Image: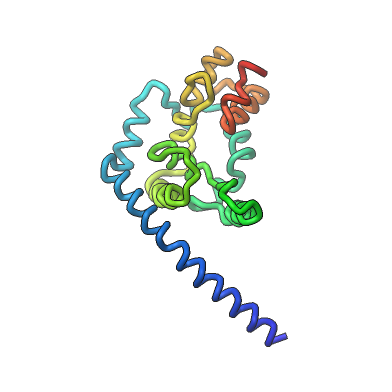
Amino acid sequence: MKKLFKRLLAVLLVAVVVFGIVAMPYIKEGYAMYKQAVTDIPIEQKVDQIRSQDAYTPFEDISPVFIDTLLQSEDRRFYQHFAIDPISLVRAVGANIFHGRLVQGGSTITQQLAKNMYFSFDKQLERKVAELFVAFKLESMYTKDEILAIYCSLAYFGQNCYGVKEAAGYYYSTEPLLLDKQQSAELVRALKAPSVYNPSTM
């Protein structure tokens, strides 16, 4: 049993070293991408810009039903993790290895916010690394509720609607605080693919 354990440990160690060697160039390029982004526009400035827009909606003005639906769909352990969700990450890595390409990101809401704030939507490894650095910084600077409010005010819901305030008004002629269960479900579904799951076509 001891020999088997030692062999498994050796294999794991080799795998970690190999992964580190392979991943290092992507980490370096991703970090450079992150530094460039936050040098051009610091995170505090970017957040202030979002909060100054008409589409910005404070956390307390968003329906709890919508928030619950969003978390169930996008990030169930949002209040427990710090920028990354190890469980989702392992699941995503497994799917990517199985398919032999990047098909799943395992992104948390904080990572999605980082992407929406700074980066393109291309599924490239360097961008994922840069996104992680921004996500860690966001989690260290803002509360979970603040991050949710910023995310909900920036997310795209289709039909040129950015933020839950614009989406609630456009699709349902209501305020974000008054979104019901069905409306919340439709809007959260639209986040995954606005052109496919557009509430106006449901």
* Image coordinates for residue 18, horizontal then vertical, percent: 51, 70
* Image coordinates for residue 107, horizontal then vertical, percent: 54, 46
Tell which of 70 and 130 is nearer to you.
Answer: 130
The residue most toward the left is 40
* Image coordinates for residue 198, horizontal then vertical, percent: 60, 22
Residue at left 47%, top 35%? 151
Is residue 103 rendered to the left or right of residue 27?
right
The residue most toward the top is 173
Can residue 136 be seen at all in this image of the molecule? no
Vertical order, 78 against 171 (above or below):
below
Vertical order, 12 against 50 (above or below):
below
The residue most toward the right is 1
How many numbered callouts?
A: 0
The residue most toward the front is 100
Placement of the C terminus among the 4 image quadrants: top right
Rendering quarter of residue 11: bottom right
Q: How is the image coloured?
A: rainbow
Residue at left 67%, top 81%? 5
Tell which of 151 and 40 is nearer to you.
Answer: 40
Residue at left 47%, top 26%? 163
Placement of the N terminus among the 4 image quadrants: bottom right
Tell which of 73 and 125 is nearer to you.
Answer: 125
Can residue 131 be seen at all in this image of the molecule? yes
* Image coordinates for residue 110, horizontal then vertical, percent: 48, 44
Vertical order, 23 against 150 (above or below):
below
Residue at left 45%, top 26%? 57
